[in-house]
Structures are given as structure tokens and as C-alpha cells.
Image: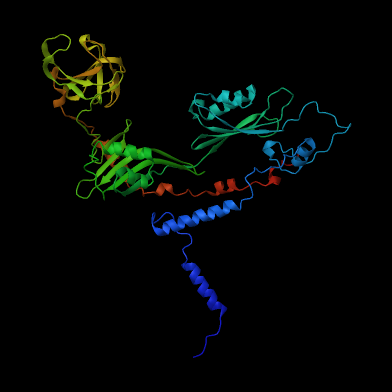
């Protein structure tokens, strides 16, 4: 039988296999308490002991003493670093001054100053210019020029102004205004400047092309109508307005299901310069599988929403005048102050002192002021011979003869008159006779007819032709706008030679 030849490769493989089979460092985090764990603990203690045994000593290390840095060394460091311009940029080696160096009497000023000023809330246009360093004469001239293009009161707070100030004519004098540019309106930019050096200030209007195609957002309702509309790209304020409008006609909790289609249109403007501006809700729609379609459009000077048939806002039932719970109902009861039984001709709502009180529906203020045991009270007249009165107010927020809308604040909870504490006593009358407010349910409606109804339907049909998301496309630039964006060559900025 032949004897196998000796091979180092076989020896290495055998040694490698045996070493791999050895469990020198078992995991101390598993099998705690087993033989394998105690063997691993022994290995850990042994290795730690060997490491400490060969440690040279435990004396503290001596650090090198800090180098002495004097002015010469500091200057050498400074000469080798790069300092940003914002911090002065005075790094690098400096030549020593000689006897020929003479100090300047005054440091030279920059020939021009460029800055951005912002109109703060409650501030005036003229004060903003004066704070920016514009002289009184130039500020008055600019204010007069701008007022000729747009009322100064219509300039919104937060508007930014690009201001350039020129070189002073004499020391101590204010810098002359070189130019001033700002966005006066979404569709207008104003530029005040001088055509020639030393010339008077002049105003240049730059009208910005604006497209007012409404923004239509349409999608499928998922788990939540709000989240589905937000996922479709609608702003939060627009979704809230849509839900508020839709909620006056549809029970959003019970009558809206997954798979329904929401559809609403917002006023939207996009400028040729790229800015966008979303406005108020114009149309609110909801398409459901087995129920009639909801189509509401804003119409009229009051901005109310009307159905596609021309019926306006339908607001069923009565709002609670305060959100507090009812503490006493309509009927006979023992009066808490007078001590005998008498008719309680209304409802009492428990509420905190100073809590707002709102009108339960649209109406007109019949009376406003002190009313005997009712204390400070407001009485409203509504349609259908219905009157309501709100008593014990701490403060009244409406005047006699004023028209109020449903949900408008008319006063604040108090305890005036015959009252044991802050609450609201709420009464209702039909044709002058007290009735139980809890038993009344009615609807406020508005109806279009004739030529106005036809205009409403034509506008609605035209609005529904807007494609979803069409207003999000970029405006195509005209030839003049493309030419205006081309960079101007430096040679073109030079004035032509004078003859």
C-alpha cells in the first residue's frame, strides 16, 4: 500500500480546522450559567489578568508644556491662514510702516450701498425709507411717485424693497437714492430710479402678465376626505373651506364613503415670473355612487354658495348659542332667587364668564341693552315671525338695527340681572309668544331666479370645463419676456458718446 506523501497544505488545513473547532471566546450573553459560559468567563478573567500583569506602571503621563506664543509667533500663524472677506480679510503678511506713511484724515466710503428693506406691520412707507438712509427730499419724491401708481395703504406688510444709495455729495449729507424696486402688486412691479446721473427720480411701471385660470382639484376619497384632498395637493386652508361648505349640505361622517369623488375649484393666479397665489373656494362638489351629486358654487356679492339648481345655502336646525351644556329647560320651575314657582320661558346654558354668544341663525337686532331681570340682553328678529333673546350678558357686541349672520358673536356670557352665576338664558318667541327653543327646527334658504339664475348656470357650466391641475402648468413666455431675461452685455450698458 503506497504511503501518502507529506503535504504542508494538508497540515495547514488540519490545523485550521482544529483552531476553528476551538471555542476560545464564547458569547457571555447567552447560555448564562452553563459550563460553556463559565469557561468563557474564565478565559475573560485570565486574559484581563495577563494584560494587567504586563502593564508597565500606573503613574500619570507627563504632557509636554504648552508652547509660548508671543506676538511674533501669532503673526506667523496669521500670515499662513485665510480669513474670509466677511471678517475683514486682513490675513497674510503685512509690510511694516515707514516714515512716508501718513494716516488718512477720514476713511473713504463705498461709492454705492445696496440693501434690502422690509415694510413691517404697522409701519409707513416713508418711515421705512428714512430708516434705510434715504434723505427726506428723496423719500417724499418716491412716496409721491409710488402713490400715483398705487395707494400707499395697499402696500402689504412684508413687502421687500431693493434699495441702492449713491455717493454722498458732501460729508454729513444723506446719500442720494440711486434706485428702488419692489413688487407693488401680484401683477405690478415698480422701479424708481434716475435715467441719467444727477437727473430727477422717475417711476417705471412693469406690468406682469397674470393668468387667472382656476385651480381644479379632483380625486377619490380614501379613509379620510381631508387626508385624501391634502394628498391630491390641495392647501390645508382650501380643504378646510371645502369641508365647511360641504358640511352644510352633507353629513360628512355618515354620507361620505371610500370611493366617492371629491371635486373643488379654487381661485388661482400665476404670474409670468413664476409666482403663484391661491384664492378662495369657488366650487365644491361631491360625486357618490347611489346618491345625487352635490354641486355648490359661490355666487353674489355676499359670497354665498348655491346649488346647481339655484338654491342657496341650506342651514337646517339652530346653532347652540354657546357650546355649554343645558342646565335648565323650558317650563314651570322654582326660581332660584325669588323662591316661588313660575314659568321659565327659555333655556339656560352653563358657560364660563366671558364666553362668546353667537346668533342661532340670520337676523336683525331689535333691541340691545339693559332689560330688567334679564340684565344685559340682545333680541334678534328672524324670518317666519321668530324672535330670539339672549340674557345676562357681561358685554354686548352688536347695536340696534344691525344685521347679523348665523354664528356671529353678539355678546359674551355674564351674570347681570337676576342671576346666581355666569350662564346664558336663551328665549324664543313666535309672533310675540314664548315657545320652547328646543322644539323649533327651520331652514334658511336663498333662491335664484330669472336672468340671474341663467347667468349662474352658465358660469357653473363654464367653470366645470376647467381641467384638473391645468392651472399648475407653467406659463409660456412671450417673445418680449424672453428678450427681457437675456443678460445685458457690459458694452450695451455704456452710454453713447455725446456729440
- Give coordinates of residue 116: x percent, y percent: 59, 33
Relative height, residue 167 to residue 31 (above, below): above
- Give coordinates of residue 383: x percent, y percent: 20, 24
Quick check: 11 left or right of 371? right
Front residue (pair 325, 280)? 325
Front residue (pair 9, 455)? 9
Relative height, residue 328 to residue 299 (above, below): above
Q: Quadrant of residue 453?
A: top left
Q: Specify whether residue 399 is in view.
A: no
The C terminus lies in quadrant: top right
Q: Specify whether residue 326 is in view.
A: yes
- Give coordinates of residue 192: x percent, y percent: 60, 32
Q: Quadrant of residue 88?
A: top right
Quick check: 277 left or right of 488? left
| Residue at point 61%, 48% (across, down) | 486
- Give coordinates of residue 211: x percent, y percent: 45, 43
Amino acid at each position: 500500500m503506497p504511503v501518502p506523501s507529506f503535504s504542508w497544505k494538508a497540515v495547514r488545513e488540519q490545523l485550521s480546522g482544529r483552531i476553528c473547532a476551538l471555542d476560545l471566546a464564547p458569547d457571555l450573553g447567552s447560555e448564562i450559567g452553563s459550563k460553556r459560559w463559565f469557561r468563557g468567563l474564565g478565559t475573560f478573567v485570565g486574559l484581563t489578568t495577563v494584560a494587567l500583569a504586563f502593564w508597565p506602571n500606573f503613574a500619570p503621563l507627563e504632557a509636554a508644556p504648552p508652547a509660548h506664543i508671543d506676538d511674533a509667533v501669532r503673526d506667523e500663524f496669521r500670515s499662513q491662514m485665510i480669513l474670509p472677506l466677511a471678517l475683514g480679510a486682513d490675513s497674510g503678511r503685512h509690510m511694516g510702516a515707514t516714515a512716508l506713511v501718513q494716516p488718512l484724515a477720514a476713511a473713504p466710503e463705498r461709492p454705492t450701498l445696496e440693501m434690502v428693506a422690509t415694510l413691517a406691520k404697522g409701519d409707513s412707507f416713508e418711515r421705512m425709507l428714512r430708516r434705510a438712509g434715504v434723505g427726506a427730499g428723496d423719500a417724499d419724491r418716491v412716496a409721491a411717485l409710488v402713490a400715483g401708481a398705487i395707494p400707499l395703504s395697499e402696500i402689504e406688510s412684508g413687502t421687500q424693497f431693493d434699495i441702492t444709495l449713491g455717493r454722498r455729495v458732501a460729508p454729513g449729507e444723506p446719500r442720494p437714492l440711486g434706485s428702488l424696486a419692489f413688487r407693488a402688486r401680484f401683477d405690478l412691479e415698480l422701479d424708481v430710479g434716475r435715467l441719467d446721473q444727477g437727473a430727477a427720480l422717475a417711476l417705471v411701471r412693469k406690468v406682469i402678465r397674470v393668468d387667472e385660470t382656476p385651480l381644479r382639484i379632483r380625486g377619490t376619497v380614501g379613509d379620510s376626505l381631508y387626508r385624501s384632498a391634502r394628498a391630491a395637493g390641495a392647501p390645508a386652508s382650501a380643504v378646510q373651506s371645502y369641508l365647511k361648505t360641504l358640511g352644510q349640505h352633507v353629513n360628512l361622517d355618515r354620507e361620505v364613503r371610500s370611493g366617492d369623488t371629491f371635486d373643488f375649484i379654487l381661485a388661482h393666479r400665476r404670474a409670468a415670473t413664476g409666482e403663484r397665489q391661491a384664492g378662495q373656494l369657488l366650487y365644491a362638489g361631491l360625486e357618490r355612487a347611489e346618491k345625487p351629486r352635490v354641486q355648490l358654487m359661490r355666487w353674489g356679492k355676499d359670497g354665498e354658495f348655491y346649488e346647481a339648481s339655484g338654491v342657496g345655502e341650506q342651514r337646517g336646525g339652530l346653532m347652540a348659542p354657546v357650546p355649554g351644556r343645558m342646565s335648565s329647560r323650558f317650563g314651570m320651575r322654582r326660581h332660584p332667587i325669588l323662591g316661588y314657582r313660575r314659568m321659565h320661558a327659555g333655556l339656560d346654558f352653563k358657560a364660563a364668564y366671558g364666553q362668546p354668544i353667537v346668533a342661532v341663525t340670520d337676523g336683525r337686532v331689535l333691541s340691545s341693552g339693559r332689560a330688567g331681570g334679564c340684565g344685559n340682553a340682545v333680541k334678534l328678529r328672524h324670518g317666519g315671525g321668530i324672535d330670539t333673546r339672549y340674557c345676562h350678558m357681561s358685554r354686548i357686541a352688536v347695536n340696534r338695527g344691525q344685521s347679523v349672520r348665523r354664528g356671529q358673536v353678539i355678546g359674551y356670557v355674564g351674570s347681570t340681572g337676576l342671576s346666581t352665576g355666569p350662564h346664558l338664558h336663551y328665549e324664543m318667541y313666535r309672533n310675540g309668544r314664548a315657545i320652547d327653543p328646543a322644539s323649533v327646527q327651520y331652514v334658511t334658504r336663498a333662491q335664484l331666479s330669472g336672468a340671474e339664475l341663467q347667468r349662474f348656470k352658465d358660469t357653473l357650466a363654464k367653470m366645470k370645463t376647467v381641467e384638473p391641475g391645468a392651472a399648475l402648468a407653467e406659463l409660456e413666455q412671450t417673445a418680449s419676456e424672453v428678450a427681457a431675461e437675456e443678460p445685458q452685455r457690459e458694452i450695451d450698458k455704456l452710454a453713447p458718446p455725446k456729440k
